[in-house]
Amino acid sequence: MKALEAISTIAGKYFAVWVILISVIAFLVPEPFLGLGGYITILLGVVMFGMGLTLKAVDFKIIFTKPLPVLIGVCAQFIIMPTVAFLIAKLLNLPAELAAGLVLLGCVPGGTASNVMVYLAKGNVPLSIAMTSVSTLLAPIMTPLLLLLLAGQWMPVDAVAMFKSIIQVIILPIILGLAIKKFFPAAVEKSLTVLPLISVAAIITIVGAVVSGNAASIATSGFLIFTAVMLHNGFGLLFGYLTAKALGQNEVNRRAISIEVGMQNSGLGVALATAHFGPLAALPSVLGAAWHNISGPILATYWSKKPAGNSKEDSSVHPVEARL
């Protein structure tokens, strides 16, 4: 068991490395990965099930005790990222499927990796976890609605079908995870240390499946869409921080909101794009899975060396090691 825990720690710590490595391998040698595309939805469900296992009642306490930062952060998440994605797609004149895929990446909720980045950046971890949880629970409504408004000009959007997909691959696995934790708390507690390994394995399999299926498209338009993903992420981190600052939030909250807004649930983007738009539309989310886990640690490392100011919020008291 200790060996598994050690492997799990390494898997989580070097997540970005594994994503990049598997992307390169799947691009150069796509054949072994081509049969994995049919498992994307199941694999994402596994990741979300793990999220359900790690959620605690205390994660939602801040929503009721200090709701304003959560409200600011979630609103910024669903306003800044979709809008920026839409404008970048227009300015770069992306092909229809890639444009819809970028907007989709902007419309999904925050990713759980953001919680770890906020922890490393000395930000408000409870706020980050609350934002991830709330935006994820709102995703069945907000993601299809925003896509209908912003991506419909490029690709047909079946909002009802997308709503059902999000319920199936996000909400139900989380509920199942919560239920398992309630009835088998001791077993769940013992398994938490290996959750990063399971999550990393699931996500890199998803990445490998999509990259292998789009190797030719990546060769022709990879640089363009990677530029779009980098700009999208960068503006999300910047505008998230500036929004929090403009609305009077302290430094630990600004860092949490910035990272939470800038880092998306790329796995959900891949699953929804593959199911509803086509494999090429999944490319922005695949590249996002890699880039978000490069930019996030870079920013977190920078902030970790900067004082966050005096605050009653103590980000160190909330363990996030079991999260991705």
Image: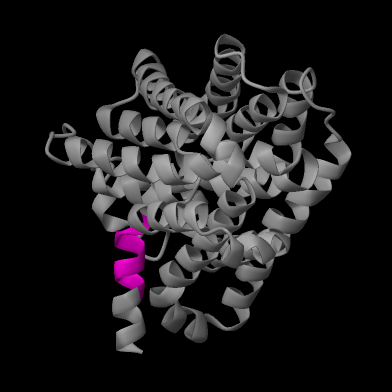
In the rendered image, the vertical position of residue 48 relative to residue 65, given as above or below = below
Q: Residue at x 36, y 52 (%)?
A: 16
Q: What stretch is highlighted in magenta?
A: 8-15
Residue 288's x, y, as percent?
Answer: 49, 39
Q: What is the tally of numbered marks visible in this picture?
A: 0
In the rendered image, the vertical position of residue 317 relative to residue 3, given as above or below = above
Q: Which residue is drawn at 33% across and 79% down?
A: 5
Farthest residue, direction top: 91
Residue 312 seen in the current view: no
Q: Is residue 31 left or right of residue 255?
A: right
In the rendered image, the vertical position of residue 170 relative to residue 163, given as above or below = below
Task: Name the foreground residue: 78 vs 158.
Answer: 158
Q: Secondary structure of the magenta portion, mostly? A: helix
Instruction: Look at the image and say whether residue 292 sits in the magenta stretch.
Output: no
Q: Quadrant of residue 163?
A: top right
Q: Which residue is drawn at 20% across and 42% down?
A: 301
Q: Residue at x 67, y 22 (%)?
A: 95
Task: Name the foreground residue: 283 vs 197.
Answer: 283
Residue 313's x, y, as percent?
Answer: 28, 42
Residue 69's x, y, as percent?
Answer: 44, 30
Q: In which quarter of the image is residue 122?
A: top left
Residue 123 seen in the current view: yes
- Name the quarter where the N terminus is drawn: bottom left
Q: In this view, does 192 lie to the left or right of 98?
A: left
Residue 242's x, y, as percent?
Answer: 36, 17
